[in-house]
Image (cartoon, grey):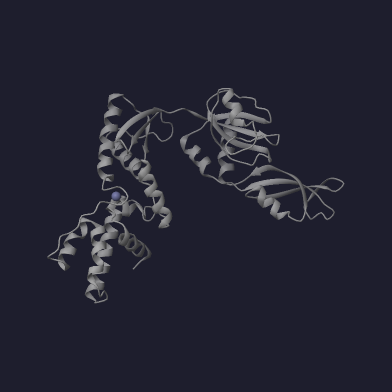
């Protein structure tokens, strides 16, 4: 048996899973299949493996397979009847979706198609709001069963319904949508949200002790509070501890508007940002370059002498804690962020170049 088969058998011993939900556990393996096809194929290949084990007399207690058969659902019914002709097949509802994922897609497609037609909406993306119970079932399953190839139910529904609507003449506009059409799985209703345009800005933090947001912080002021006072809203900022100055241009995503001045910060607006670039920025964890000021009798190679025993030391690290760890035998006066690398840098450079054209 392959790893996928072993894992699937393990899951089906414990939970009834419909074709889509089993397939979704391995969604990031293979390409160009729906999760329903993927799940059904896994069940079929499991039936082949297990049936050959039965016929080779490798399984002693046939009745141990009953639960797996029931948990596979109707696809396993004829096979069950072969070995247990006098017994009733037990239908069990899917542990994740309660056998509702397919009807929900149909319902979402119908309701959103009507809304798009009625309101003559041409630029939109789909959204899905999970019920709390479904969200917790999903989260727990992914963690408890360590499902590293899992795709969320939300994502599958959005993707498949989007595809169907595109075939019916309403392709979603991923780049620059004007509306978000959201399906609430709990109430089976849809609602529309006008999307706000988002702007990329670059900022520096020139003072210590002014955090980006007040959430979980003991400082009274923050960049987000000050910006909100001036009528601007922050959607996303790369986080950095408040005692670290940020001397490089760091991305900050807000609603559209002019530059605002906030004490301790320098914020400069850039271009409107596409959804794709926004999700790129949000998902990236860039490698950072820090500058530490060190007081030392024993300077090392590469340190830049500032004055007497004071040195500037430049270190590539994921966090200031890592910098302190590297310099644990030294007296570190302070740490500043002076650069970052990787994909985030490339996206940022692209926007900065746009400004200069
Ligand atoms: Zn299901």
* Numbered-mark total: 0
Residue 276: give x, y in percent of width and height: 47, 38
64 displayed left or right of 278: left
166 displayed left or right of 298: left
The quadrant where residue 121 appears: top left
Residue 73: give x, y in percent of width and height: 23, 56
Q: Is residue 132 above or below residue 149?
A: above
Location of the N terminus (image quadrant): bottom left
Residue 141: give x, y in percent of width and height: 39, 53
Residue 350: give x, y in percent of width and height: 56, 37
Q: Nearer the viewer, residue 34 or 318?
A: 318
The quadrant where residue 189 appears: top left
The quadrant where residue 132 appears: top left
Location of the C terminus (image quadrant): top right
User: Residue placed farthest to the bottom in the image?
Assistant: 57
User: Residue placed farthest to the front in the image?
Assistant: 218
Q: Nearer the viewer, residue 286 or 131?
A: 131
User: Residue placed farthest to the right in the image?
Assistant: 308
Residue at 55% over, 22% down: 231
Q: Is residue 146 above or below residue 258?
A: below
The answer to whether any part of residue 33 appears in the image is no
Residue at 50% over, 37% down: 278
The answer to whether any part of residue 315 appears in the image is yes
Residue at 26% over, 29% down: 114
């Amino acid at each position: 048996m392959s790893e996928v088969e072993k894992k699937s058998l393990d899951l089906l011993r414990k939970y009834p899973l419909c074709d889509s939900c089993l397939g979704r556990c391995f969604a990031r393996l293979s390409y160009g299949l729906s999760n329903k096809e993927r799940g059904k194929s896994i069940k079929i290949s499991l039936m082949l493996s297990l049936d050959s084990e039965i016929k080779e007399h490798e399984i002693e207690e046939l009745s141990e397979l009953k639960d797996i058969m029931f948990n596979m659902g109707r696809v396993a019914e004829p096979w069950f009847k072969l070995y247990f002709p006098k017994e009733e097949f037990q239908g069990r509802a899917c542990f994740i979706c309660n056998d509702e994922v397919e009807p929900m897609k149909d319902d979402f497609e119908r309701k959103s198609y009507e809304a798009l037609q009625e309101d003559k909406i041409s630029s939109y993306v789909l959204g899905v709001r999970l019920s709390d119970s479904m969200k917790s079932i999903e989260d727990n399953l992914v963690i408890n069963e360590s499902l590293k190839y899992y795709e969320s139910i939300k994502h599958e529904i959005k993707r498949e319904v989007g595809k169907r609507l595109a075939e019916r003449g309403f392709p979603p506009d991923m780049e620059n949508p004007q509306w978000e059409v959201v399906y609430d799985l709990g109430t089976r209703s849809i609602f529309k949200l006008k999307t706000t345009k988002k702007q990329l800005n670059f900022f520096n933090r020139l003072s210590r002790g002014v955090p980006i947001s007040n959430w979980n912080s003991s400082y009274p002021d923050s960049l987000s509070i000050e910006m909100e006072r001036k009528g601007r809203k922050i959607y996303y900022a790369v986080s950095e501890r408040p005692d670290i100055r940020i001397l490089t241009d760091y991305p900050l995503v807000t609603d559209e508007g002019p530059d605002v001045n906030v004490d301790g910060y320098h914020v400069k607006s850039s271009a409107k940002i596409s959804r794709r670039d926004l999700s790129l920025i949000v998902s990236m964890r860039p490698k950072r370059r820090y500058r530490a000021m060190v007081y030392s009798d024993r300077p090392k190679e590469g340190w830049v002498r500032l004055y007497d025993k004071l040195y500037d030391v430049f270190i590539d690290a994921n966090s200031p804690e890592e910098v302190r760890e590297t310099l644990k035998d030294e007296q570190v006066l302070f740490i500043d962020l002076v650069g970052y690398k990787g994909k985030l840098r490339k996206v940022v450079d692209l926007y900065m170049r746009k400004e200069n054209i």
